[in-house]
Image (cartoon, rainbow, N blue to C red):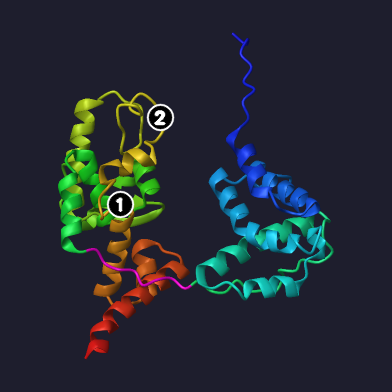
Amino acid sequence: MGIFEDDSEPSFEGWLVKRLEGLAPGIRSETERWTRVLRDGGPRSLPRREGTVWLYLNRVRPALLEWSSSYDHLREVTRDDVLAYLKTLRGQQRYDQLSSLRSLFAWAKRNGLIFRNPTSRIKVGQYEYAVLQPLVPAQVDRSVAAATTPATRLILALAAVHAARVAQIATLMLDDIDIDIDIDIDIGNRRLTIAGHVRPLDDLTLKLLLDWLRHRRNRWLNTANHHLLINKQTATKTSRASNHWISASMCGQDATLERLRVDRQLEEALTHEPDPLHLAEVFGLDEKTAMRYADSARALLERPAERL
């Protein structure tokens, strides 16, 4: 009716005030402007999710508190100050805080708040990833037992066999499946396209796919939704199912859809030698991701020799 006026303060405002406490006035105002640009976007930047904004400000706050005892504005912070602060950090903490500080000072430089970016030419460094670990059979078995419907069984196969991400599964269309139910028997004539990458359809995935398509047709015969996986909410629309619905059946399991996806790619690296080019070809991975799986597989394969 237009007679209600919501005058409650958003939680973000209260959180921002608390996070900026203790900073020198000049540093506080500059940091507040940067934080709001992160959240709302600007002429040359897209808005970030609120959770990302929280992470960025929480990461730069310790350094800003330390510099506030000596300086009043960001333009007074020198490269030596940044290097001295970074010497107290190691590993992931150094990586995260330097990345966030670079964002803050780069924004300040673009907007004429500082004369020189003190974080320029300071390398973040290559992030040291932990060795990926394969799932144990019992973990996979529990996830298989939790998949009790045609939809969840197909979802499980797409993650565990084809290494599809949750969002990729949700956006699959009927046109991404190239099969003829009555004619195609030869596996060479079956195709599944995931995120633009064409993959052959194995017997297991084909069986689960056909089970789901029969269930889909019997329950929602007249739906206009062309997404492969639909539910009672999306059957009357044309939008895709949510990521939460796709992954809900595996929530609480050790072998989540994401871990099953990772495990499938790691298994390929262990079985066919740690070759990043092979992994990139099979799964459509980028160079860095393929190298990470190859490095983990190589480390796992070398461990028995180290124990001898």
Is residue 19 positioned above or below 73 on the image? above
Corner quadrant of residue 121 = bottom right
Label 2 sits on what residue type? Thr
On-image quarter of the C terminus? bottom left
**212 within the magenta span:** no
Can you identify the residue that label 1 sits on? 257
Dot 1 alpha-carbon crowd within 10 angstroms: few under 14, some 14 to 19, many 20 or more: many
Residue 119 visible somewhere in the drawing:
yes
Mark 1: secondary structure: helix
Rendering coords of residue 165 (x, y %): 36, 52
Q: Does label 1 or label 2 sit earlier along the sequence?
A: 2
Can you identify the residue that label 2 sits on? 238
Mark 2: secondary structure: loop
Is residue 169 positioned above or below 127 on the image? above
Report whether 297 appears left or right of 80: left
Q: From mark 1 to mark 2, how far is it between C-alphas?
A: 24 Å
User: What is the magenta range?
Assistant: 128-135
Rendering coords of residue 293 (x, y %): 37, 70
Corner quadrant of residue 187 = bottom left
Corner quadrant of residue 149 = top left
